[in-house]
Amino acid sequence: MSPEPQTANDRITSPRSARIRAAAKLTRRSWRAKEGRFLAEGPQSVREALVAAAERAGRVRVRVFEVFVTDEARERHPDLLDLAARARVRVHTIAAELVPEISDTVASQGVIAVCATLDVPLTEVVTGDSRLVVVLSQVRDPGNAGTVLRVADAAGADAVVLTSSSVDAYNPKTVRSTAGSLFHVPVVTGVGLSEVAELGRARGLQVLAADAHPPAHDLHRPRDTGLDLARPTMWAFGNEAWGLPEKDRAECDGAVAIPIYGRAESLNLGTAAAVCIYESARTAQL
């Protein structure tokens, strides 16, 4: 069966359009949770969503309801129209002045998709076959969360968990920061660190806190303290400002510190996560 043809009704010029108003509500977290939908903005994010929806394969089940594009974006990204046709997703051309209604960016690229939320149950992705799981506990900055999710995708992680105290995975800035990786890696939300750590251990993963407070293993001298990063590992990363509180560190099997060779006081969350996650991925390949 061929995709539905485009019609004159697919051009939207009024801010009172029911579709625009419905999409605009998704800029609010409460409405995203109620509707089970979110906005993915930018050519890269929308492209990855449409590819996943069209292929109906991979580890993440993706559903795209509709795509909004400006005339300029249609001309600049014809591949997105082809992908939307493959995925049987209707594309609406909207007037450029309507973009701010459904976008929170200063200079939008004029491509926005409405997608179904992607949450999966914790027990579905943390299994006896899991080798690398990334947990964000009390991480509040959407850009940081998106960056870590993108790193986890690149390193081949089995899943990313955002605890109930962390930023919304579907915050528009979080989604943009993943650069499409949100549609590649299973994501779990709304759980507590203790629950995640307990299940991880039960499934054979060691639970490591990325934390420099002693006592801690040295990431670059693992043999000194018996740290084995070749083992299946669940990494826990804490808040950007204060890291993991003592009670959260106690939920983990041990802490790991990244050595600082220069004069910097510390690494930011995204960089620290990248170093730790890739060290696990590298060691697993040896």
Image: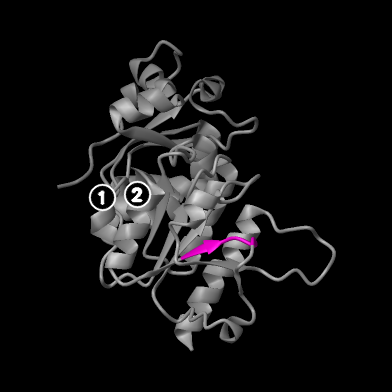
Query: Are the two marked residues, 1 and 2, in contact with CB atoms closer than 8 angstroms?
Result: yes
Q: Residue furthest right?
A: 263
Front residue (pair 39, 223):
223
* Picture coordinates of residue 78, whole percent (x, y): 46, 47
The segment highlighted magenta reads: 208-213
Q: Tell me: 96 left or right of 66.
A: right
* Picture coordinates of residue 66, whole percent (x, y): 33, 35
Residue 42 in view here: no
Q: Quadrant of residue 131?
A: bottom left
Looking at the image, residue 23 lies above or below residue 271: above
Q: Dot 1 corresponds to which residue?
A: 121
Label for residue 188? 2
Query: For residue 72: magenta?
Result: no
Looking at the image, residue 164 lies above or below residue 155: above
Dot 2: element:
strand
How many labels, in total?
2
